[in-house]
Amino acid sequence: MLSIFPKLSKQFPFPPLLPYSQRAPTPGRRRLLLQHRRFLPLLMADPSHSSPTAAAAGDSLLAPATSDAPEAALPAAAPDLDAEFGFQRPELGKEKLAGTVGFHQRHVFLCYKSPAEWPSHVEATDSDRLPRILAAAIKARKSNLKKSTKLTICEGEDGTESSLGDVLIFPDMIRYRGLTHFDVDNFVEEVLVKDVEWLPGSPEAIKGSYVFVCAHGSRDKRCGVCGPALITRFKEEIEGQGLDGQVAVSACSHVGGHKYAGNVIIFSSDAKGEVTGHWYGYVAPDDVPVLLHKHIGQGEIVDHLWRGQLGMTEEQQKKALELKHMTNGVTGEESSAKEANGTNGAACNPAPAGGCCQGNGGGFTCCQSDQPEEKQDKSVPAEENHKSSTTETDKESGKKGHMKICQMPNWFETWERKDTYATLAVVTAAATVFVAFRIYKNAN
């Protein structure tokens, strides 16, 4: 500038400001800065909208470093995130959860970066090429897919078990390594359309249980607050219970239903040994031990947190939970109360598959048959085999402290309505015959 306008510096009342690193801290220059301080509001009327570098430089020159700086008071003014967006928010637990999962038969997870790097719509951002192209390819071939497929982003980082570009497919329990945007079309065609192996990357069979927690904070603050806390608790419980290598937990992107945060998806084997995916909502850190023990350990769903299941429509999800409650002879509210109270070992929640487990802090309360497996009658339903619990077992459980054997339902608690109608019909018919016979006898 000075080489083009050599007289410019003489016309200005003060020399142009130079970068701080190029100035010598001389007394004369300090006097010039103080003299021209009144011009700075014109240059930086709103420091919050100026560049951070310029604002920092100006503050370092004009404001002495003191303990009363405004930055020191900012943390105290931060809102209570847990009360507004976390586990203490007023809306938590206000809506019914069953039937809130959209129908899909296959769930694909793309391992890609960390939640802090995910934009609001990571599958539709130009800068994130791989998830954008994969989402577009699945959408374009939707009518040709053999199974209805849902795509979600999960945490992925090179050097970890789930590296950048890895693809996890459930309930197939398959991992493909190192997908790039060049391979997307071929991958979708071979794996998702033709349902065959993708030759460039041999599939790896994955075992154990997988837990995904929505922590997509840039999409919704509720998931951004609840998700990390749940992941921390899951990792603590997994390590404390010695489940490393058996249960994996990872952050994931938007799964639908942010208002139900914390949202958790669990893929594990059910009571029949089949892998399926279950969605849970309104999950709090204190629910983590129950999910690990009851769902993953026992293959039973936790009713009051259950949103739905992979492969079911919304209506099927609602009917499935209603049928379970009818089978157990309890209402939805009673089931919720039993599972909630089960965390302190005060209640037992019988399940159709037999047995029940609830957390009580450090230990768990389990209801199981004390008959050896080889002595149980395979032709009799599981509930009948569990009726062999005796009073002596109850006494022994009191000595153990952390175990409690609960009495299973009596025969009339499992008596079906159609059996009642049939019995009433037989009794009514017998009474009618008896009365008719008496009338006939008296008439003669």
Image: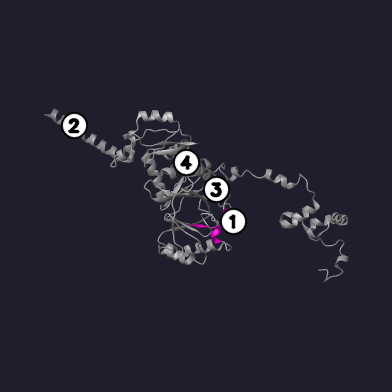
* Relative horizontal placement of residue 350, taking residue 34 as reference (left or right): left
- Mark 3 residue crowding within 10 angstroms, few (<14) / some (14–19) / many (20+): many
Q: Earlier in the sequence, mark 2 or mark 4?
A: 4
Would you name the residue on which mark 2 appears? 434
Distance Cα–Cα, label 2 vs label 4:
57 Å
Question: Which of the two residues, 315 or 17, is positioned nearer the viewer here?
Answer: 17
Magenta residues span 109-124
Three-letter amino acid code at the position of disc 3: Gly
Would you name the residue on which mark 1 appears? 117
Q: Do the numbered discs 3 and 1 sit on residues whose CB atoms are within 8 Å?
A: no
Q: Earlier in the sequence, mark 3 or mark 2?
A: 3
Q: Earlier in the sequence, mark 1 or mark 4?
A: 1
- Mark 2 residue crowding within 10 angstroms, few (<14) / some (14–19) / many (20+): few
Distance Cα–Cα, label 1 vs label 2:
82 Å
Would you name the residue on which mark 3 appears? 227
Three-letter amino acid code at the position of disc 4: Val
Identify the element where label 3 is drawn: helix
Residue 10: % across, % down = 88, 66
Image point (43%, 31%), residue name = 400
Q: Earlier in the sequence, mark 4 or mark 3?
A: 3
Q: Earlier in the sequence, mark 1 or mark 2?
A: 1
Identify the element where label 1 is drawn: helix
Magenta stretch containing residue 43, yes or no?
no
Q: Do the numbered discs 2 and 4 sit on residues whose CB atoms are within 8 Å?
A: no
Residue 96: % across, % down = 47, 45
Three-letter amino acid code at the position of disc 1: Glu
Identify the element where label 4 is drawn: helix
Identify the element where label 2 is drawn: helix
Magenta stretch containing residue 117, yes or no?
yes
Specify whether residue 191 is in view. Answer: yes
* Relative horizontal placement of residue 405, taking residue 18 as reference (left or right): left
Would you name the residue on which mark 4 appears? 290
